[in-house]
Structure formats: C-alpha cells, structure tokens
Amino acid sequence: MHVSLEQLTVVLVEPSTTQQKLITRYLEQQGVSSIRYYDSGINALMSITTDQPDLVISAMYLPDMTGTDLLHSIRLEPETQNIIFMLISSETRFQALDPIRQAGAVAILPKPFAEEQLRAALFSTVDMIDPHELQLENFSAEDLKILVVDDSKMARKHIRRVLESMGIENIQEAADGSEAVPMLQKEFYDLVVTDYNMPQMAGDELVSHIRQHSNQSSVPILMVTSEQNDVRLALAQQSGVSALSDKPFEPGNIRALITQLLSDA
C-alpha cells in the first residue's frame, strides 16, 4: 500500500476560527482535503472514536482540556492509541511540551510555522502509515534483538511501533537504566535505544555502565530524548552514546540512524 498526502484524513482541533482557516490553507496547499474541524477536545474525541482519522492536529489550549489531555485520552484507548498526533502551539515551555513529546507526537510545530515544517510532519505521518522495512546487508530486520529503555510507557509504545514498522520483531523493554542492567547481563542485544532523563539510573549512566562494565561494551546505543540542555547532551555523547535523536522524531531519520549504526557495527 502506498499512501499519499492527498489520501490523508485529518481531524483539526482548534478553537480559533482564524487559526483553523490558516492551518487548513496550508494543509490544502500540500494536497490534504479531507479535514474535520472541532473546537473542543470532547467533541473531537467523540468523532475520533467513531470515525478514526489518520492524523489529529491540535492546539495546546482548548476550552475543555489541553492538547496533552487530548493526546493522553487518545493513547489510553486501544482503538485509538495508534492515531498519529501533531501539536501546533505557541507554547515553548519545556514542562508543558515534554508530556507531548513523551506520548509520541509526530511533530510539535510553533505558531506561526513554516510551510516546510508542516510538509515534513505530513510526510512523517505518511511514513508511519506506510512504513519501509530496514534494508541491511549482513542480516535481516526480523533477526535483530533490540532493548528499549524509557520511563514513559507511552514513549516505549511509540518507539516500539516505529521499530515494528521497520520489520523488527524482537523488542524488549525496560523502564529505566536500573531495570535494563540485569537484562543486559542475561542477553545480548544488537541495539539499545534509551531515553536520557529516567529515575534510578539515567540514560548517560546506563551508557557509561554498558561501555565500561558490561560484556557487550560495543553494542550500538541510540539515545532518543526530549532533553534540551546542550551541556547535558554533550555529557551523554561523551559517555559513549552512538547517536542522538530528538523527541519527537521523524521515523525516516530513526530508520537512517539505525541502518547506519548497524552497518557500522
């Protein structure tokens, strides 16, 4: 199945009529024409449950809830948990945006946003609906064993979904570094995907442990994180992380990073 931008169905949750019109114009310029409009979270949720779209685009602040509340409600219901979500907001505070990142948004766009930003997010949406398997020279994707370490259950689900879309079947999970350590002692992995900020043992501590004290010190490690502090990210790189990616991430970028890491390995 090949999905195009013209085939996308979108639910737009935006209380401002002006913003609705502006976002609609940008969507239509990209070829998206199937758009349903709602000015409140409750009305949007009722619609999403009965007629699931490919993508939900929401503002952060709605009359009855926040965009974070809306996304969490979508993620908590089995029938809607895999719907792709995009936030468009002028909100810039880390503490406000981080729950959106952790819950697996395809993109967080600012107000105002550039046409190129929306286009990239829409192509990421298509990539998640119609994914491409990893193309590796030395082994197949289904033979890989990957450990995902993240204290957010929603983030782990999102990462797992992206990995599974690449043809990777053997994925194990840990809630933080301290839970991952005994797993690393028992089993060998082809790749470790870890968050940075976690309780008990943070991502940089886990990376240091793997590099200095484990029996698989050369395993590729991809850090997928919402951390914004450049100094802390530099320390994570110094600890031995193989590659870094932001949350939210583009599936195509993750696919390219994993392909490179496993090819180098």
Image (cartoon, grey):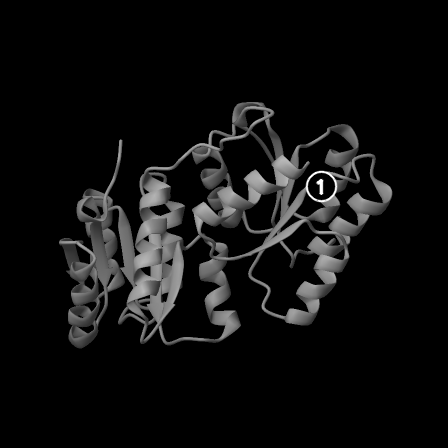
On screen, residue 187 above or below 57: above
Q: Which residue lies furthest to the right in this view?
A: 213
Query: Is 113 placed left or right of 141 in the picture?
Result: left
Q: Can residue 4 be seen in this view?
A: yes
Look at the image and tell me in which quarter the C terminus lies: top right
Q: Quadrant of residue 57?
A: bottom left
Residue found 22% across the figure and 55% down from its top: 11
Residue found 17% across the figure and 76% down from its top: 18
Q: Can residue 60 be seen in this view?
A: no
Residue 127 position in % (x across, y down): 36, 43
Residue 191 position in % (x across, y down): 65, 37
Query: Is 4 placed left or right of 87 in the picture?
Result: left
Look at the image and tell me in which quarter the N terminus lies: top left
- Looking at the image, which is closer to me, 81 or 110? 110
- Callout 1 secondary element: helix
- Looking at the image, which is closer to me, 183 or 139? 139
Query: Is 6 placed left or right of 109 in the picture?
Result: left
Q: Quadrant of residue 31?
A: bottom left
Residue 167 position in % (x across, y down): 47, 29
